[in-house]
Image: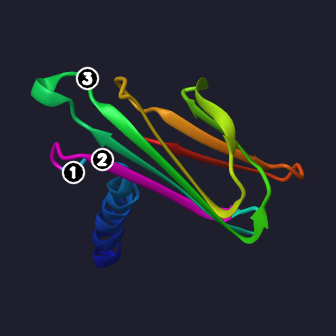
Amino acid sequence: MKATAAVSGIAVPLAALALVAPGAADGGKDDDVRVREACLGGTGELRLRAKEGDGGGEGTIEIEARIDVPERVRTWRVVVLHERTLVEKGTRRPSRSLRVRSTVSDWPGSEAVTVRVATGAGRMCSLEATI
């Protein structure tokens, strides 16, 4: 009984560390968060990279979204939000893949970024990540 209690006493803190590790900062270096999921019959990936400012100034968050679909899309409509604030809105040329890149200021605390895409046929996909 004592051995089981000791093992579970260690397993719970280790499991908690495993859950925190992917989003945790790595010693003051740049943070990187990736979200990948099914999107419009293909795959969508949202990558956020936090970069520290020069001399301890305000940092930035680089946003990169990529959507790959099996069929060519005639028109892509794109909306990028940072903490529910519009960063970018527009249309993109026809293709089977879409790449969106943007940069925003890194505010204190955790921040949510959402990239929404829609096709001309009305199919939609939303990718969300927090850094």
Q: Earlier in the sequence, mark 2 or mark 1?
A: 1
**Label 3 sits on residue:** 58
Residue that lies at the very extreme toward the front in this rendered image = 93
Between the C-alphas of marks 3 and 2, the distance is 15 Å
Residue that lies at the very extreme toward the right in this rendered image = 121
Count of residue discs: 3
Q: Earlier in the sequence, mark 3 or mark 2?
A: 2
Given this view, does label 3 or label 2 mark the residue nearer the observer?
3
Q: Is residue 83 left or right of residue 123?
A: left
Residue 67 against residue 77 in the figure, above or below: below
Between the C-alphas of marks 2 and 1, the distance is 7 Å
Circles 1 and 3 in contact, beta carbons < 8 Å:
no
* Residue depicted at 28% across the width and 77% down the height: 3
Label 1 environment density (alpha carbons within 10 Å; few <14, some 14–19, many ≥20)? few
Residue 89 against residue 100 in the figure, above or below: above
In the picture, residue 74 is in which quadrant? bottom right
Specify the amino acid type for callout 2: Asp
Q: Quadrant of the C terminus?
A: top left
**Label 2 sits on residue:** 31
Q: Quadrant of the N terminus?
A: bottom left
> Which residues make up the magenta segment?
27-38
Given this view, does label 2 or label 1 mark the residue nearer the observer?
2
Q: Check if residue 17 falls in the magenta segment.
A: no
**Label 1 sits on residue:** 26
Label 2 environment density (alpha carbons within 10 Å; few <14, some 14–19, many ≥20)? some
Between the C-alphas of marks 1 and 3, the distance is 18 Å
Element under disc 2: strand
- Residue 30 rendering spot, x and y as whole percentages: 24, 46
Q: Check if residue 31 falls in the magenta segment.
A: yes
Does the magenta stretch mainly form a helix, a strand or a loop? strand
In the picture, residue 99 is in which quadrant? bottom right
Specify the amino acid type for callout 3: Glu
